[in-house]
Image (spheres, helix red, strand yellow):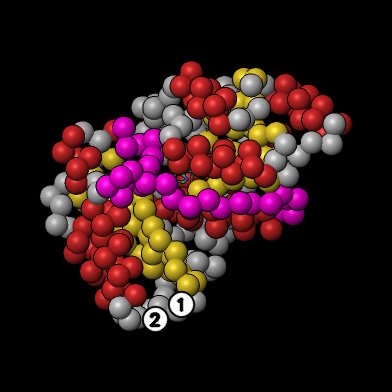
Amino acid sequence: MQIVNTVEEVRRQVKAWRKEGLSVGLVPTMGYLHEGHKSLIDAAVRDNDRVVVSVFVNPTQFAPNEDLESYPRDLERDAALCEAAGASLIFHPEPSEMYHEGYSTFVDMRTLTQVLCGKTRPIHFSGVCTVVSKLFHIVTPDRAYFGQKDAQQLAVIRHMVEDLNFDIEIVGCPIIREEDGLAKSSRNTYLKEEERKQAVILSQALKEGQELIRQGERNAETVKKAIREKIETMPLANIDYVEIVNFKTFENITELQGEFLTAVAVYIGKTRLIDNFIMTL
Ligand code: AMP
């Protein structure tokens, strides 16, 4: 497995693979890889002849008050995980390789990005769409893999690919969880012992909401209220949002029907965690 830092090196390698008629999968990540990322790499290795994993903590998707500097990084460990999973190449650029001096082009989506995480993090999805577009142009993959853990991101990327005519299949992968239900995340490493214990409330509250719906509840407000109240039982939990939206339009729904996304963002101490489930009725 190769580790390369420049756009040129990626292009050269992908061109060589293309000459041999090989298919290419891309797994975009910010590194500090865990089982969630590994499930994406596994899927990509199954579907493609060669797999590129990008490891890049993208500065344009962080606001100045967010955790760009403290975001965990460990390329050596990431490389071992990628190699064991069967990836062919890690693209690990410096920020200056992706954003040269005077860089000024951004991809802004006008729908989907103003709600949920976009409300709290107004520049986030512009940074995500921009970096993912750049990675798509650099790697030119046949398929790219994204986790349902970031359900809004997955929907935004699918929409962008349709809008901008990227000839790339977007593959969504299920959420991988810790044994107690906490969705795996690189940011879980921020949690102190007591915070880690209380963080389980996100998945527990969502499970309770899901159960209410299974029992026949169809009023979105009632389900959101139950989820909110469950989360609020944890003293260290501070709710950012609990929302239920149509999974196509991301508009709020009052009556549960069709395909909808139930998503939460919760601060546990200073760490902002997200989780969700998608259901079709
Ligand atoms: P990140 O490194 O956090 O930007 O995540 C890179 C990719 O891995 C994104 O598509 C995420 O949705 C996905 N991912 C992160 N955590 C998980 C998880 N627990 N289960 C499934 N996919 C995940």
Q: Residue at x 53, y 22 (%)?
A: 79
Is most of the magenta stretch helix, strand or loop?
Answer: loop
Q: Amino acid at mark 2?
A: Glu
154 in relation to 16, above or below: below
When asked about the image quadrant of residue 233, the answer is bottom left
Residue 133 in sight: no
- How many numbered marks are there? 2
Expressed as whole percent of the image width and height from the top left, the position of residue 171 reads 61, 51
Residue that mark 2 sits on:
255
Q: Is residue 215 left or right of residue 173?
A: left
Q: Residue at x 39, y 29 (%)?
A: 71
Q: Amino acid at mark 1?
A: Leu
Outermost residue toward the right in this view: 19
Q: Is residue 45 left or right of residue 81?
A: right
- Nearer the observer, 215 or 237: 215
Give whichever of discs 1 and 2 has the lower sequence position: 2
- Nearer the observer, 30 or 63: 30
Element at label 2: loop
Expressed as whole percent of the image width and height from the top left, the position of residue 274 reads 36, 50
For residue 281, the mark is 1
Q: Residue at x 51, y 42 (%)?
A: 39
Q: Is residue 174 left or right of residue 11?
A: left
For residue 189, the mark is none
104 in relation to 267, above or below: above
Circle 2 packing at 10 Å, graded few (<14), some (14-19), many (20+), is few
Expressed as whole percent of the image width and height from the top left, the position of residue 140 reads 74, 39
Which residues are drawn in magenta?
163-189
* Residue 275, magenta (yes or no): no
Disc 1 Cβ-to-ligand 1 distance below 8 Å: no
Circle 1 packing at 10 Å, graded few (<14), some (14-19), many (20+), is few
